[in-house]
Image (cartoon, rainbow, N blue to C red):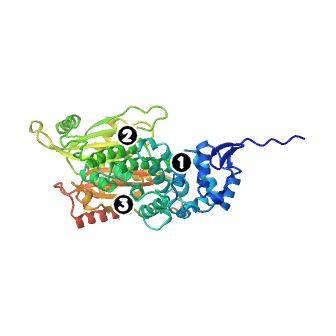
Amino acid sequence: GGTKPQPERTPLAEGVVEMDGEAVLARAARPERDPVLPLRAAAAAAQAGLPLSRHAVRHLATAAKPLPAPWPAEAREQLITLLGAGEPTLAVWEALEAERLVTRLLPDWERVRCRPQRNPVHTWTVDRHLVETAVRASALTRRVGRPDLLLVAALLHDIGKGWPGDHSVAGETIARDTAVRIGFDAADADVLAVLVRHHLLLVDTATRRDLDDPATVESVAKAVGSVSTLELLHALTEADALATGPAAWSSWRASLVADLVTRVAGALAGDAPRVARPTAPGAAEERLAVEALRTGEPVLDLHAEAAPQDGAPEPVGVELLIALPDQPGVLPAVAGVLALHRLTVRSADLRAIDLDPAFGGSAVLVLNWRVAAEYGSLPQAARLRADLVRALDGSLDVAARLAERDAAYPRRRGVKAPPPRVTVAPAGSAARATVIEVRAQDAPGLLHRIGRALEGADVRVRSAHVSTLGANAVDTVYVTRGDGTPLAGEEAAEVARGLERALSTA
């Protein structure tokens, strides 16, 4: 009767070993004397890609003493190591959650634990989304100068969802308090607070505002404050969106955010504002404008881009240039025709240009739109042009056709969409126009209905920016009076109220 061999134990960290494919506590481990041990064990398990023994977690939950506040440096470093381990972090975090160790480490976690999301575009509950965001952020740490701040911001960015009111505002306070609790200095705590407060700023601004407007860039630069914080916010924005669900991130959104970040970085460095599209028409726009003036009819140019390779993100859309003699009803007509052809509008720029006297000297309306097919291939430009001509002369009833198609869509019984909400952005948010933001249930022809209502209000739309997330759409329109000046305060408010009434009864 020989002695039974003891299982092999491979050291992973102080007080933590691997045994039988799990991370377990070493025989000499003393949780009651080592308050950092729960985090050290979790970090070692995640780094090794091993599950953390349930028995070890239960023993730690029973025996380990609370960490002092602020945490010792080792505890903070072990938390960051755990968050930076990538996919293995998920299983280890769940093991800590099962014994309520996470709440002991981060008391504010209790309010988001197993909390459902309000927006169905989210795949995960709030707590799981936060950990998923940290996992996504771990793949982006090489892009930033402070990976530790990125990972902690990812873990805390939605922590305010457990409190009433704006979760970003509530989260700012919680993030600052938590940062101090886990041992960051005051400067780092301030950065984490800014990241949590503004974690939606880049994607919201990039998809809903005119990036050519200097006021857009200035407002973001003021909120962010420094290039290093902007760098962190850019990575956090991507990690957050990727962890939300497939509808939250695309190559289109990524390109807009990257463009905004480039402009803001330049502003923070003191560079002059960059204007992507000059006031004077480009060669293609002028060519179309001359042709439109010569024929007296719309001229279209659809620039299809190369299809993405297998596995690559979808294309960011195609450029649609339209030139036609300036006339009322252009925005609703174009938006309606595009909706009939199942094209999604992502951005729209409308401007009147005065041609050289050699070409007649008349004003021509030039539209530069970015569109994408909902599914299938793009329609032929000739078909779009023919329908646009009919829409403008009244022989194609766009509103009736869209209503017929909308009626054919299946409806969820007993579920009523919330009413649309129309607001006017603060006066300082744009330099050359009044910004009106429409939040509504996404539906074919929404921009067409917005355009019709604004035409009825006798205002001119300079540009439109469309952002859709799941079933919700946020369409932002920059409007002016007929003479090109922004609307006054009460005048803008009345336009917004009228638009809201029109959309509510549509």
Q: Which of marks 2 and 1 is nearer the N terminus?
A: 1
Quarter containing the C terminus: bottom left
Is residue 485 depicted above or below 353 in this figure? below
Q: Residue at x 39, y 55 (%)?
A: 191
Residue 491 location, quadrant: bottom left
Q: Label 1 belongs to which residue?
A: 81
Q: Distance between the residues labelled 2 and 1?
A: 39 Å
Label total for image: 3
Estimate the x, y position of residue 290 in percent, counting from the top left: 18, 36
Q: In this view, does 287 lie to the left or right of 449?
A: left
In this rendered view, identify the residue nearer to me: 174 or 260.
174
Residue type (three-letter) at the residue carrying disc 1: Thr
Q: Which of marks 2 and 3 is nearer the N terminus?
A: 2
Say which of marks 2 and 1 sits in front: 1
Check the image and name the residue furthest to the left: 357
Q: Label 3 belongs to which residue?
A: 503
Residue type (three-letter) at the residue carrying disc 3: Leu
Residue type (three-letter) at the residue carrying disc 2: Gly
Estimate the x, y position of residue 163 in percent, counting from the top left: 48, 66
